[in-house]
Amino acid sequence: MANRLSVIATRTGDDGTTGLGDGSRVGKDDLRIAAMGDVDELNSTLGLVLAEPLADARLAADLRRIQHCLFDLGAELSIPGYVALKEEHVRDLDAYLAHYNATLAPLKEFILPGGTRAAALLHVARTVCRRAERAVVALGRAQTVHPPVRQYLNRLSDLLFVAARHVNQVAGTGDVLWKSPNSRVGE
């Protein structure tokens, strides 16, 4: 990237369009822009998670690496035909999943988002990730999207679920279990 942004308010978007990385302009409601926005929101949500004190330094480092990959993923979305994410990035998420899931008890019941603040924020990130994935799938129906982009978001939402459980476990909080309607009678 030869030029860094020095002027933020260019006023070129006042007409309801925005520029892509290849110089073309599209409507701000374009499917590509929606996907980019959802990925940006996901990255911002992970920034919020990382603003919390995390007892697990490895998880914090992994989430920072993921933020960089999400920025690369956004760049790929912003330049049609450009490839930044590779299958190895998806494999990295699979390795993270295996690591964090290894110490967790098998789920016997659904869980509710919650526990510690960091875990709750990871659940928010998971739901934003699912929305970003849906936006990328919608974009992929209309335009070409490199498969690792979709796969990365799918794996990442799984990882964020597992990371939330891991954070609660490390904090000694445990999962917040869903109770069936019959078991909630009288509460």
Image (cartoon, grey):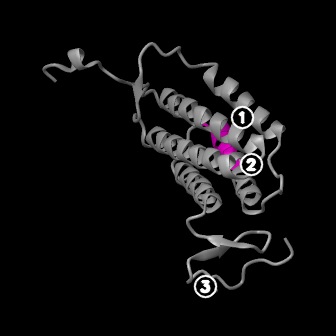
Quadrant of residue 81 within the rendered picture: bottom right
Q: Which residues are magenta?
A: 56-64
- Secondary element under disc 2, as helix, strand or loop, is loop
Quadrant of residue 98 within the rendered picture: top right
- Badge 3: few (under 14), some or many (20 or more) residues near its Cα, within 10 Å? few
- Badge 1: few (under 14), some or many (20 or more) residues near its Cα, within 10 Å? many
Residue lying at 43% horizontally and 25% vertically, measured from the top left: 175
User: Can residue 119 be found in the magenta stretch?
Assistant: no
In the picture, the disc for residue 145 is 2
Q: Looking at the rendering, in which quadrant would you find the N terminus? A: bottom right
Most frequent secondary structure within the magenta stretch: helix
Of callouts 1 and 2, which one flags the residue occurring earlier in the amino acid sequence? Answer: 1
Quadrant of residue 40 within the rendered picture: bottom right
The relative height of residue 169 versus residue 130 in the rendered view (above or below) is above
Of callouts 3 and 1, which one flags the residue occurring earlier in the amino acid sequence? Answer: 3
Residue lying at 76% horizontally and 50% vertically, measured from the top left: 144
| Marks 3, 1: nearer the viewer | 3
99 and 81: which is toward the camera: 81
Residue at which label 3 appears:
9
At which x and y percent is residue 134?
57, 44
Amino acid type, label 3: Ala
Residue at which label 1 appears:
93
Amino acid type, label 2: Val
